Amino acid sequence: MLFKTKTFEDAPVVLSIEDLTVRLSGNTTAKPVLDKISFQIRAGETVCLVGESGSGKSVTSLAAMGLLPKGALEVSGGRILLGETNLLDLNASQMRDKRAKSLSMVFQEPMTALNPVMRVGEQIEEVLDTHSRVSKREKKQRVLDIMEQVHLPDVERVYRSYPHQLSGGQRQRIMIAMALILEPQLLIADEPTTALDVTTQRQILALIAELQEKHGTAVLFITHDMGVVAEIADTVQVMNHGILVERAPVETLLRSPQEDYTKRLLRAVPSLVPRQERTDKPPKGGPALSVRDLDKAYGSSGWLVNRAPTQAAKDVNFDIPMGRTLGIVGESGSGKSTVARCIMRLIDPSDGSIKVAGAEIAKLTRSEMRPYRKHIQIVFQDPFRSLNPRWTVGQSLIEGPLNLGQDKTSAMKRARELMELVGLPEDAVDRYPHQFSGGQRQRIAIARAIAMEPDVLVADEAVSALDVSVQDQVLKLLDELQKKLGIAILFITHDLRVAAQICDEVVVMQKGRVVEHGKAASVLGAPKHSYTRALIEAAPGRSWDFANFKELPTVAA
Amino acid sequence: MLGYILKRLLAVVPVITFVAIFVFLLLRLTPGDPAAILAGDAATPAQLEKIRTSLGLNDPLLVQFGTWIGQLFRGDLGISLISNIPVSDMVGQRIWPTINIALMTIILSVLLAVPMGVIAAWKHRTWADYAVMSFSVLGFSVPVFVIGYIFIQVFSIELRWLPVQGYTPPTEDFGKFLSKAILPCLTLATIYVALIARMTRASMLEVLGEDYVRTARAKGVSETLVLFRHALRNAAVPILTIIGTGFALLISGVVVTESVFNIPGIGRLTVDAILARDYPVIQAMILLTSAIYVFINLMIDVAYSIIDPRIRY
């Protein structure tokens, strides 16, 4: 692993934060959200701010931008010095003047961070309109110029496009163009690649590094992904509950972390090395789930439309034995979620066969499908939106069993047992989803699926929205449940690290087709298809063993 | 876009046909004999029969319907049973005051309500927000005729700034039109201002929490531009829906205001026709109003796709 080793002691300090304290508005007794944070960033330096959700890393960046949500959070002490100016002393219009000109920000979700009803060219131009006075012609030239610099293709066309007409990576390039067009001294990037595919992520990281090099920009990079940290950081700062826990050059931090919290965070990073192959034989009997020649095509001709249908999935074949886990990996648009939805019969497959516990379900109508629903259950990605907020956990848990004719008392008794099974107190059934953390909610979502006693559990990016330490716990829980109940798991993920830790077999999909299928160890350890290799190569920090603070012995190629 | 509009226009045909059949049957099957009403209380059965024959009321329903549709296509809406004037003339005279008043009302409402809603959302949970919300509760709860009479009392009788009632077409004398139309428009506008302001506020509150609003602020864009350039256009779809529906309702349902201010519009025409069972007029009115609804809805949909490039049909 090649870490960045440049020192910045001679470079001028760009941002200096001193004893910054942020509190909930109108609440002086509660624990501060940020507690006396102090750090500096020098010109050309990349400082990575890492930590789990709620650690205060985003609050730090919003405070620097003067964008803390009004009426919710306020700075109650400290200084934020940009050069010689304390940003906290500026009034609203002076602060507006600094934004984009002296410090700018790139956000996590390129899908929502751009105004959907404005052409992207106009949105970049707006920065120039706000901060400078240039002729219309020069303005457009500068916008096209920065668009070239962020390597957008066909800039004249992109200039006139609306955000929804561009890909996620292109949108993030637009955001970066917008942030850097006035060459600010400081760029704050808040999880700028988290919502992107690995290959796109790699391009965006390279782009930020390239522009940083060119303009000598200081970068404050917020992320929860240790792989990204290993790739791009000069200095790493670990945050936990509003406190700066540890700060060190990247190699020092990853090789010899000092604080317990840092160590715990690093140990939770799932390894890219696949888990040990299971030696025990799967139970007798046919596969729990068997998929043959599954096809799904969208948008074939209607009476006024006539265009070639889009093949969202084509010729998909696999089996999952009882008690085993098969992972489908691939980037967005690869068709992995389409396959999951076809199997759940949330959408209708165009062709092919799906057998669950021996029964063919691919062609069943909605009402014929009902009795088979209990055999196959799903856990979705976002635990904040997949539970009904106005129902108690108990109500959500027993709805399925009640529909299948179980009586309420016994269903409720079972719900309490399930809570214990997934590691929650049994009185959790009387509470509402908002009273739980993301990880706890995902446990509830799993309990809800298990309540139906399914043969197959489909986990659609079920740990992608969780912090690494919580991710680790939920993966362990799934593993335990599988051992106890013998369910088969279909695990859909874009994260190769997660796939390596939970899957027995892996299917790699690209553009609706399966490009590689085999044992996890062989697919991830010795990939045959060029696309699989490209995916693994794009995984950040792939040659570093985070959990053991050292290089991986042999690098998979 | 043009293809979309054509497709939508085609879809209008079955709607209007259905309305036509419905309207025709409903009124013919309602108890009450138009011939009896025309002839008066002292008429003999023979006289009634003569009137029925001359109006075609004795023909089978299907024949009556066929005749009627045929006339419709020639722009002939029939002749009023009561006044013996062609219905198209009657409607033609009365529709313009209504449309003019409705247009002015809706323009006035939008000009007042949208900024109110935007400010209420921007100053969420401050006195400005509470003031807008209180006004909107008031606007909803006070009956239109009460507001109308209060305005007349204050502005016409006490202050003598404006005429009490009446109507002058804007083509004749625009100043006179304004001075006579301003009170009825304000009266009508109260409820629409309340409605549109509330909708604007709710829609804006949602949009102001979006990521792209934060992005705009991170660019250093001024608050006014954040509100009106970035947020309002994204919040516009539900607001437009309310404005469109409001306009359609204004055209068909301003009877009370027309009565209070003595405006010769189609609201009163409709009521008079219903009371007198003047079939041709009633049918024309219902057809006209449903055509207006369909047309306005089409306009709203086209406006959606202009405002939001993601909406393409």
Image: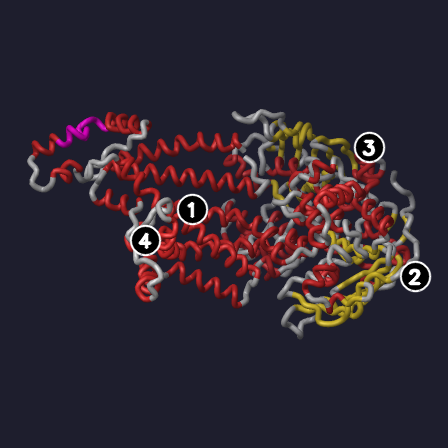
Q: CA distance from mark 3 to mark 1?
A: 57 Å
Question: Could you tell me which residue is drawn at 59 percent across and 40 percent down?
Answer: B310
Question: Could you tell me which residue is drawn at 69 percent across and 66 percent down?
Answer: A91
Considering the numbered disc 4 on the image, is that residue within a helix, a strand or a loop? helix
> Which amino acid lies under the numbered mark 2 shown in the image of this protein?
Glu
Is residue A126 on the magenta stretch?
no
Count of numbered marks: 4
The chain identifier of the residue carrying mark 1 reads: B
Name which of mark 3 and mark 2 comes first in the sequence.
Answer: 2
Q: Nearer the viewer, residue B109 or B213?
A: B109
Q: Is residue A477 visible?
A: no
Q: Quadrant of the C terminus of chain A?
A: top right
Provide residue A190's location: percent of width, then percent of height.
74, 54
Between tags 3 and 1, which lies in front? 1
Q: Which residue is mark 1?
A: B245
> Which amino acid lies under the numbered mark 4 shown in the image of this protein?
Thr
Q: Are marks 3 and 2 on the same chain?
A: yes
Q: Are marks 2 and 1 on the same chain?
A: no
**CB atoms of marks 2 and 4 within 8 Å:** no
Question: Could you tell me which residue is drawn at 27 percent across and 29 percent down?
Answer: B68
